[in-house]
Image (tube, grey):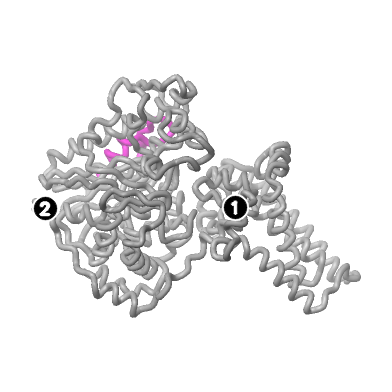
Amino acid sequence: METYLNGSYAERAVWRSDHKEAFFFNYMIVFSLFIVFLGIFNRYFVSFVVTNALVVTLAVFSYYKFSFLGEFLYPWDLLLYNNVLNLLPNLYETINLTQVILVFGLIVAVIVAISVFLFIKKPKRWIRLNPWVRMLFIGLGAAYLSIFVFYRSIPEVESTLKDVDINNLTFDQERNYKTNGFLLTFMLNMQSAIVLPPSGYNEKNVMDIVDNLTKVEPQSNSTAKQDPNIIFIMSESFWDPTSIEGLSFNEDPMPNVRAQQDGHILAPAFGGGTSNVEFEALTGFTNMFLPPGSVPYQQYIKSEIPAMPNYLASLGYETTAIHPYPKWFWNREEVYKHIGFDEFIDIDGFTDPVYRGPYVSDQQVTDTIIEQTEANEDPSFIYAITMQNHTSYNVDKYPDFTVETQTPPAVDPVFNLLLRSYTQGVADADAAFKSLIDYYETSDEPTIVVFFGDHLPAIGNDYKLFKQAGYVPRGAGDVNWSLEDQKKMRSTPLAIWNNYGTEVPDLGTISPSFLAPTVFDLAGIEQPLYHAVLENFQAEMPGYTNEVKIDADGELYKVTPDKVETTKQQYEMIQYDLLFGDQYSLEKLFGN
């Protein structure tokens, strides 16, 4: 199975030798499944077939998912059966789907034929267990499997796994699967699909928190004469490459964003996980209250939840999401329905789009934003996610370059070529941003534009460019990084601009969760009571990620400090209520 998923028996033989504990745990997971089924069916052959069928099916799904999306199978993928249906036409172009169906059909036919033979002939059982032994088998097998599913919740298990070099590398799932093996990693990821209520969650405690909130009143003295258009641009991998000392550029790649910059976004991810950044920006929720490795868009948003789009829609806004990529990616098609977007313009919604490299250009996205606001009679809320500067940063990504870069001698020369491709994408995004504000500068419609990068780019495995250039310390992963290093590797530029003269304050470094109150304030829009929850927490800890936390004085923390604990518990209780619970607080927090 490992050879099938990774393509090389020799490579997995080395893995088996170097990671004996991981190999043993993967083997024991299969064996535990077998004894559970043996306890259930009390038939050796049936248990053997069911165990192998289950494991092989998971492996096959993982193989084709990785072939198409570059990701292994996650436990929460099993809940996304609609995505599989949407993916089939694309998969058909990539794999011989007819052959796969025939193979599966043959396997099923063989199993059915053998089962019918056994039923008719009724051969003597190879094994017969009494009820107590069967119960013991089920209990032992389930207990062993539950160790990996609930490893964070069982005392000493996580530390014991770390002692034998088993770590759930949620920040890099590809490395996670290759290091720990498919089945072990799949089991370790299961806890991310389970969210337990915080201590004391009930209607009384939730409403006590709500009753003590004070509604946020606008402080910005917005000069907009009517509700302004609100445009969010989450720019793919947008970051300031000139922040690495020793790199040189023939020109500033981002002069326009730099001129308008008001702070930084503290991204909850590095090099990927765009939807998790988007989740925070659109809902005001934080990934910190979810299991590590979670992908809320894929796992948790299965019905309507409160978010910026549906609140603005209730105020008369026309809400539109724009992303020049297939709508099934990150489960956006379903999620956007649940959070209140009236329209989603994905790649199929663009007519003859202009490409820059392998993806639709940032300028094309800008043009589409302008077309959309011009077409709408009511004020527009637009959330646009660009795609042009997505990895990979191949040498030949663009047919021409306006930027030139130079890395220091200590950096492998190949990274200079990759950096040039990346920086060209930054320059193009900056130019598209300028064309957007130039357009609205002369528009009669009041408009506010929020531009930020979703995360830093992944240039080289294991942060190689950043380490070779001395931006962060060397060593495996981020083991040698300080909290300041963690902050640098998660901070992307944030620029907020408007055409009606309202001054934008210096925002410092903030999590995406806190964008909505700031933007509503600048727009002069009535804020929901929920924003009081966000502002209370932001006043104490404006930057909040798993790797680094930033308090109001700019102090950095790895663990949430005690002084913030009370406000954190209130925030967590409200988030659980709105996202997973009974939504006791919904009407009061979001009623107009």
Question: Which residue: 43% across, 43% down?
Answer: 270
Which of the marked residues, 2 or 1, is nearer the chain's N terminus? Answer: 1
Residue hosting label 1 = 162
On the image, the x and y values in percent for residue 170 come to 52, 50
Disc 1, SS: helix
Position above or below: 548 against 198: above
Image side of residue 584 versus residue 292, left or right: left
Q: Is residue 376 visible?
A: yes
Residue type, numbered disc 2: Ser
Q: Residues within 10 Å of mark 2 (few under 14, many from 20)?
A: some
On the image, the x and y values in percent for residue 462 come to 51, 37
Q: Residues within 10 Å of mark 1 (few under 14, many from 20)?
A: few
On the image, the x and y values in percent for residue 376 come to 21, 51
Between 54 and 406, the one lying in front of the other is 406
| Highlighted range, magenta | 350-371
Residue hosting label 2 = 222
Quarter holding residue 282: bottom left
Question: Which residue: 31% across, 65% down?
Answer: 567
